[in-house]
Each structure stands twice: as C-alpha cells, then as structure tokens.
Amino acid sequence: METESPTLPPTPTTTTDKLLTVVQRAPRPAVDESTLKHKHLLDGPFWQRIPSYREVDEATFADHRWQSKHSITNVPKLLAALQGLVTPEFVTDAEEGFRRAPMSVRVSPYLLSLIDWNDPYRDPLRRQFIPLASRLLPDHPKLGLDSLGEQADAPVPGLTHRYADKALFLPLDTCPVYCRFCTRSYAVGVDTDEVEKVQLRVNEDRWRLAFDYIRSRTELEDIVISGGDAYNLRAAQLEEIGNTLLDIPHVRRMRVATKGPAVMPQKILTDDPWLDALTRIVERGRKLHKEIVLHTHFNHPNEITAITQAAMGRLFERGIFVRNQSVLQRGVNDDAETMLLLVKRLGHVNVHPYYVYMHDLVQGVEDLRTTLQVAIDLEKHVRGSTAGFNTPTFVCDAPGGGGKRDVHSHEYYDRANGISVFTAPSVKPGRHFMYFDPIDALPERGRAKWAKPGNHQKMIDEALDRARQLKG
C-alpha cells in the first residue's frame, strides 16, 4: 500500500537561502511597546500632587533658582510641606529619624515630588533622603564615619591620593540635596546631633595647596572634582578649577562629579552660566586632547523623568559625556527588575551606567545596606540585558582605603559571618581589606556570633587566614 510522503521544505542551495530558512524556522516574536518600561518617563505637572506646590506652574518649577530657593533645609519645614500627605505617626517617626541621622536635611521640591506619598514607608526615594526611626538598625560594629579612609590618604586637606595616577579633589562640602547614605557624612553638610563635621568649605588657599600638590606629582593624570557636589560651585569657580587643572601638563583626564541631574535637573536647563562654564572647559580640554566628563548619580528609575531626559539631551548636544555611579541599597534597587530598568533607562537618556557600588560602611544607614551576594547575583542578571558599554561594573570600595574591587574578585567570602576579604595589589600591595555584610541579613548562626563581641576578632582572623590559604 502506497502512502503519501510528507512535504519537506526545499533544500537550501545558497548561503542566503540557508539564512532565510533559519529566520523562517525561528522567528523572534514582536515586542509589545507597552512592555518597554524604560521609555516611559514621568511627565506633566506631577509636582502639583504636593499641596505646597499645587499652584506652581511649569515655568516656575523648571527654574533652578526656584528649586534652590525652595529646597527644604530643616526638619520643621520638611514636615510642614508634607501636611495632609502623611500621618502624624509618620511625622513623629521622621522627626526622631532626623535627630539620629549623621546627615543634615536638604531636599529639593523636585525630589520631594517624585516620592509616592501614598506609600512613603516603602518608597525607594524616601528611603534615600528621609530617615525613619522605626526603620533604623544598629550600626555594624566594624563601620566608621570615614569608612574609606579618605582623610588618611589626604596629603593636603580636601585632596585624596590613593590610586597611583588619580586623585580626588573636594573643593567644597555642600550639595543640592543631602543623601542619607553619603560616604562623606564626616564632612558634607552642617553639623548634626550625631556628627561634628570636618570643614571643607570653599577656600582658595586650601585649593592652592591641592593644585600645588597635583603639579608636584607628575604621575597624577586623572582628577575627580567632587565634594560636596560640583553642582554647588559657582560658574566662575568651576571654570577656575577646570582651567587650572587643564594648565597642568600631566593632567590628562577630569571627572566633574555631581548628584545634581538626579535631584535638580532644572539647573542643566536654566543655569546657562554654569552649563556654559562646563562646556568651555570640556571644549578647551578637547582641543588639548584631554578628556573631561560628567559623573552623576542615579539610584532608581523613578529618578529619571522627562525633565531629566531634556537635561541630559542638552548635555549630549554639547558633546558632554555623562557616566552614572549608583549605590546598591536595600529596598531601593536591590532586586533584578529595578536594577535592569535603571540600567536601561539610563541608556535611554544617554547616560552610561559605569559603577554600582556596594553601600559603604557609614553610620546611621544600616537599613540601606545589602550583602555582597546580592551584588554578585544582580550583576549576573544585568549582564547581557543591554550593550556591554552600558553595563555597569558592580564594585566594593574596600573599607580602609583598598579602592574599588570587582565584587566577584574577593579572595574569600564567608556568607554565614558576612565577611568578604579583598586585596588591592596595585593600590596597597600586601594588605587585606574586609567588607562586612549587614548583620540582620545573615543566617541565624552568623547573627549569633556577632551578638558576642568576644567573637568578632576571631571571625576576622579566621577569614584572613582562609583568604591567605586560598591565595596560596
């Protein structure tokens, strides 16, 4: 009995035919545009949801001078602005939180408007800027106010020289907002009930010492201009610093560091003197074959709005390259979905994701820290989701001055005790540096060990011994 043979596709005879056959056999489904969340940016008069800003029109809200003038700089003003939005219990919680915080208060109207006041306890932006006493955790016994040892590596006040060819210059100690998690809470902002600050105010004599040191060290090719925040430099000051450094022959690269685009993008759009000053030093640097870029600091996709996109577009039009450095924070960006969205949204507005830092071991913010394992896992999720040049490196800025270490590069990691050990052979050879996971995130046996101070040094010694054994 004869049967009908199945119909087979024609055998490809050329390379093109073969490629077409592959495409026909494995079509990629079309993407629903609504799922591309990184393109969906908050727009419209969102600030009018705040009673205090209900009558503020777009032109006013877009003015950096209005933003700066109306930034909230003390707790009573902040809580007054939230009247009708939060419960009396939240107000009491925030009052006590600020009383115990190492950072002083400064919040821009723009930032305040981005917080979801229907759910302030869980909002990722509120967590970064408004401390709540009910959420605070005891500090890890091994953290300190200057956890990175910046002052120990400072040959002159306000200049840290740790890496062979790079220095960190801190020309001022103020910012457009004050972040709870600031690694320089030892110096930034005014004194608080908890911290008497190291003074790094604008001072040309102090600047001169820094410039003289940089001139004297011909190995220094890369200078980071930070603070505080370069956003708070006047246009003339920014240009003076930029040109002074450009005039030093061996300085090849500069990074102007600012949180500003994340918390007050209006300055990029309306402060023409400041932006023109930045543009002039970037253009002069280009003519001298020297690189000047802007480094900024977005931590959550909700910080990127249509206003942000307009501001970043203006920088892009002027040929100003922007890189981003995020801080990994619990309840802010420590899940894969949020981190992926942040990375994609940054790329969408022409900001290159550069680093994601482990949260530094600073006082008063243990509730924001995560484990090293979280960073390791997140990096695996992010890698491959977008172009390699838009994929950040997840790093631990090793406490004690070891510098930035890839989170995967630990010599040893005891996940039960939360102790990771790093080395930095090109920074401080022969030394070991340890990062400590937050104790509340450890398994029960690890928490039990840290509960007994007599165990602390033994755990550290065991981790160091194990790191040395593994290194051989």
Image: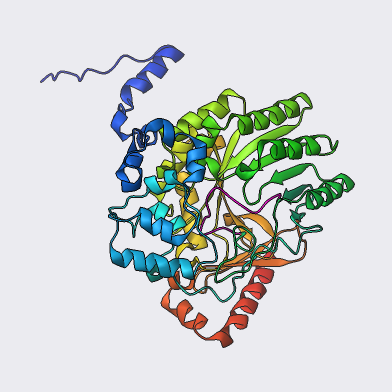
Q: Residue furthest right?
A: 216
Report the side of 127 relative to 49 (left or right): right
**Count of residue discs:** 0
Rendered position, 129 above or below 364? above
Report the side of 258 relative to 246 (left or right): left
Span of residues in magenta: 171-183
Task: Residue at 61%, 82% (x, y): give it.
Answer: 458
Report the side of 267 relative to 445 (left or right): right
Residue 245, image x, y percentages:
79, 39
Rendered position, 417 above or below 404? below
- Residue 175 magenta-drawn? yes
Residue 120, image x, y percentages:
33, 56
Q: Quadrant of the N terminus?
A: top left
Q: Residue furthest left?
A: 1
Q: Please say whether residue 77 is visible from this viewpoint.
A: yes
Residue nearest the observer in this picture, 317 or 442? 317
Q: Please say whether residue 383 is visible from this viewpoint.
A: no
